[in-house]
Amino acid sequence: MSQRTRRGVTPHAITIPSARTSSPERTDAPDGRRLGLTLGMLVLPMYVALGAPSVALPAIGRALAVPFGATAWVLAAWSLTSALAMPVAGRLLVRWNPFQVLVAGVVALAAGSALAGAGPTLFVVIVGRLIGGAGAGATVIAVFAAATALPGRHRIRALGIVAAASATASGCGTLLGGAVTAWLGWRAVLAIPVLALPLLLVALPSRRALTRSGGDERNGSTGRSGNDERNGSTGRSGSGERNGSTGRSGGERNGSTGRSGGGERNGSSERDGSTGRLDIVGAAVLSVLAGSVIALLQAHSVGLPAPVTLAGVLAAAGLWRRVRGTPDGFVPRRVIASRGFLAAGLIGGAVFAGYYGVLFRAPSLIEQATGGGPLVAGVFLVPAAACSVLAARLVGTLTDRFAGWRVTAGLAALTVVGVLVVAVFSGPIPVVAGTALTVCGFAGAQAVLVGLAPDLVAADDRDTAQGLLNFMNALGGGIGPAAVAGLSGIVPAPAALAALAALPLAGLVLSLTRRPAAVRRPTADHCLGPDATRGSPR
């Protein structure tokens, strides 16, 4: 889509779902509830793997004869590669359909988890967690790509179910981890994600819907004619209308106004971000930056050397230079410069940091208050995890009535309150109540922001944007526990949690000031005339 065409459209914040689903919903579209349940089952083992190993860390340290601080990498390794795999998977979705990415991700997830569970040394365990985390990141992107390709309310319904499944699984991870550690040992806990492999068979009946999401419906098509309708065309004339053009000529592909097909090649789907060519240097720089951030936060607790700080500074400078020098690289400048996109990613990362920081600390606080073990802590946290179902059901109603930035502001505020409740009050009941608030913020923000991200960028960049947004969310999920662990070695645990509340508070401020919201894009529906159905403006 040309920049001139974009500037000719007045931005309007609209309800989620937005511009991409402004046309009447298809009657042959996959059912959002059914597909959401299928995808939700696939993410269960992955999100259990986030919380379950935390209660097994002492047993891992004793069995492998390593200091407890060193076992922190069992959690950090998973979060790191999971975050990094997401933008890579977003690029793969340009060439592969979601089902293919899903299969690759689940296979890597199962293989890495099996290696971690059988690892004779901590190094092998961490390598397995690195591989499993990468598979988890790719699987998450495939799941969300399939869900966001659904039209209308089917999309938000599927996203809500997936968000509820992920929050419930991560919240119940401590319960399952405590039970499995007590009955089967710590190796079985690390191998839990292997269960995703047989669950993949459940997705086979939905394979057609997953494949269609990656092909005919990619980039917002209405699904009426297949390849000729990619990127939002209306299917009236075939190749001349691809990528949202009005069908005036073949030279108007990619949303051009008739100048020429070749003249706009540099701004079309032949960009690096659309053809799937991977910017290895950009990916490496981003990897070093993300790893340095998490390692720096844990430097005090695990005794990391000072060069970690230098590596982070150099990586940040390298990423800034890469984005400026390679606009179509691994982190496309046009994507992060899109109105509201960077704010949406920072808000999601801040909310995720608050949730996972509380989830990291809550089991030990409950154990101290009750005198019980991991199993007791897990039982207490079950009601908090159940709140994710309520949050997922409410988010669809809220996004129909309020603009997306209002909803994210409310969810960030819930997370701030939840973190502070856990930090200030003692006893199992306040801990469970505070955790429940952060669960609501996590589940709701995930559904809202993932549904919003594709509408913040051009059609050709939606898969890339989805990967980068989930990268920022997952990185926030790694930063939260790392910050709490690092600060706990310097200040008391309540003070560390209180300091963590600054992150979701920053997300709240961003929601109120930057107001990330979908922007109308000139798609084929806008060319149908004044009688075309459109989303409700906000």
Image (tube, rainbow, N blue to C red):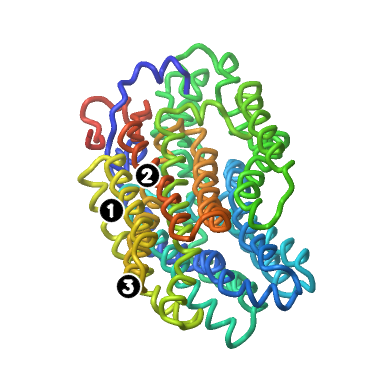
Q: Residue furthest bottom?
A: 183
Tell me which numbered mark, 1 or 2, is placed earlier along the sequence: 1
Residue drawn at x 39%, y 36% is 455
Closer to us: 446 or 55:
55
Residue drawn at x 32%, y 34% is 515
- Tag 2 residue: 505
> Helix, strand or loop at disc 1?
helix
The disc label shown at residue 396, or none: 1
Tell me which numbered mark, 1 or 3, is placed earlier along the sequence: 1
**Disc 1 + disc 3, Cβ < 8 Å:** no
Q: Position of residue 251 (x, y in %)?
A: 52, 18
Using the numbered discs, state the Cα–Cα distance from disc 1 to disc 2 in whole angstroms: 24 Å
Q: Is residue 413 visible?
A: yes
Q: Position of residue 74 (x, y in %)?
A: 65, 63
Classify residue 28 as left or right of residue 49: left
Q: Quadrant of the C terminus?
A: top left
Q: Residue furthest front?
A: 491
Identity, as a three-letter code, of the amino acid under mark 3: Ile
- Tag 3 residue: 429
Identity, as a three-letter code, of the amino acid under mark 2: Leu
> Helix, strand or loop at disc 3?
helix
Tell me which numbered mark, 2 or 3, is placed earlier along the sequence: 3
Q: Residues within 10 Å of mark 1 (few under 14, many from 20)?
A: many
Query: Is residue 15 positioned above or below 85 on the image?
Result: above
> Helix, strand or loop at disc 2?
helix
Q: Position of residue 99 (x, y in %)?
A: 56, 56
Between disc 1 and disc 3, the foreground one is: 3
Using the numbered discs, state the Cα–Cα distance from disc 1 to disc 3 in whole angstroms: 29 Å
Using the numbered discs, state the Cα–Cα distance from disc 2 to disc 3 in whole angstroms: 23 Å
Closer to us: 397 or 288:
288
Q: Residues within 10 Å of mark 3 (few under 14, many from 20)?
A: some
Between disc 1 and disc 2, the foreground one is: 2
